[in-house]
Image (cartoon, rainbow, N blue to C red):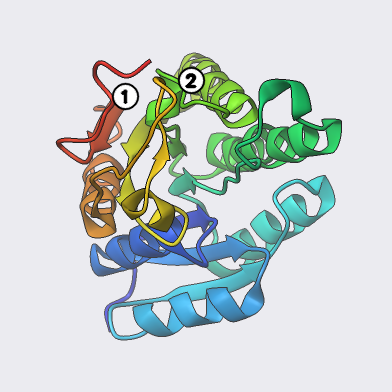
Amino acid sequence: MTTPSKIAIVTGAGSGIGRAAARGLAAAGFAVVLLGRRRDALELTASMIAADGHALVLPADVTDPVAVEAAFGAAVERYGRIDLLFNNAGTAAPAVPFADLSYAQWSHVVAVNLTGAFLCAQAAFRQMQQQSPRGGRIINNGSVSAHVPRPLSAPYTATKHAITGLTKSISLDGRPFDIACGQIDIGNARTEMTAPMSRGVPQPDGTQRAEPTMDVDAVARAVVLMATLPLEANVQFMTVMATTMPFIGRG
């Protein structure tokens, strides 16, 4: 096991895209700090990384400012700096008609997808602007829903559109501090969350159809590509998606 040269924090690291990205970053030489709500899931991710490199498990709820501050502080205490944040944690509301969406459902998605992303990005930003050598990179997980909505997905779509604004603002405000920020917009990666796509999901014409998916490792490779660029270069926006999924022409 080699000594890591860079430190990455991955939120939502206990499953799906977060787990795949954490494993890819570890294989690329990063020490990876795993954030998520479920310790057992994070421990499983860490066990998968053990052969490739370093992993630190830090259970935390990204919607809780105190928990986020404590987790980022523990990461810095352990490793001394933060070079990368993959702001990946996210959730969705049930696919119900817009008129039937509850305030609690809306608020939960906003809290995780937008407020949580802000809290983690701010914690990373504060550390990156003061550390030496200064700077770092933040990669926000957008979604193809940051561009085009699915039916019955108002909370998820609204928050993912907002992530694009957050990405642009961090990119601008980070320039004086050598902080780069980019966004990866992912469509139909094969994870637990997208399993229903193989059985059929609502389409804009009112029908239900199965949709193609892609190996989640393709997403991990894309994240690693963005993460390993020198700070003088930045992928501002990348879309990686199942080639034949209904995205272009959707809606």
Viewer-side residue, 69 vs 203: 203
Residue 117 numbered tag: none
Residue at 43 percent of width and 47 percent of height? 84
**Residue type (three-letter) at the residue carrying disc 2:** Thr
| 102 lies left or right of 5 | right
Viewer-side residue, 146 vs 196: 196
The Cα atoms of the two marked residues, 1 and 2, are separated by 9 Å
| 25 lies left or right of 59 | left
Q: Are marks 1 and 2 in contact (CB under 8 Å)?
A: yes
Q: Mark 1 Cα within 10 Å, few/some/many (few <14, many 20+)?
A: some
Q: Mark 2 Cα within 10 Å, few/some/many (few <14, many 20+)?
A: many
Residue 164 numbered tag: 2
Check the image and report above or below for 32 versus 150: below
Residue 179: image location, x then y, percent: 45, 30
Check the image and report above or below for 249 versus 220: above
| 48 lies left or right of 229 | right
Residue 245: image location, x then y, percent: 23, 35
Q: Identify the residue under disc 1.
A: 237
Task: Look at the image and tell me in which quarter the N terminus lies.
Answer: bottom left
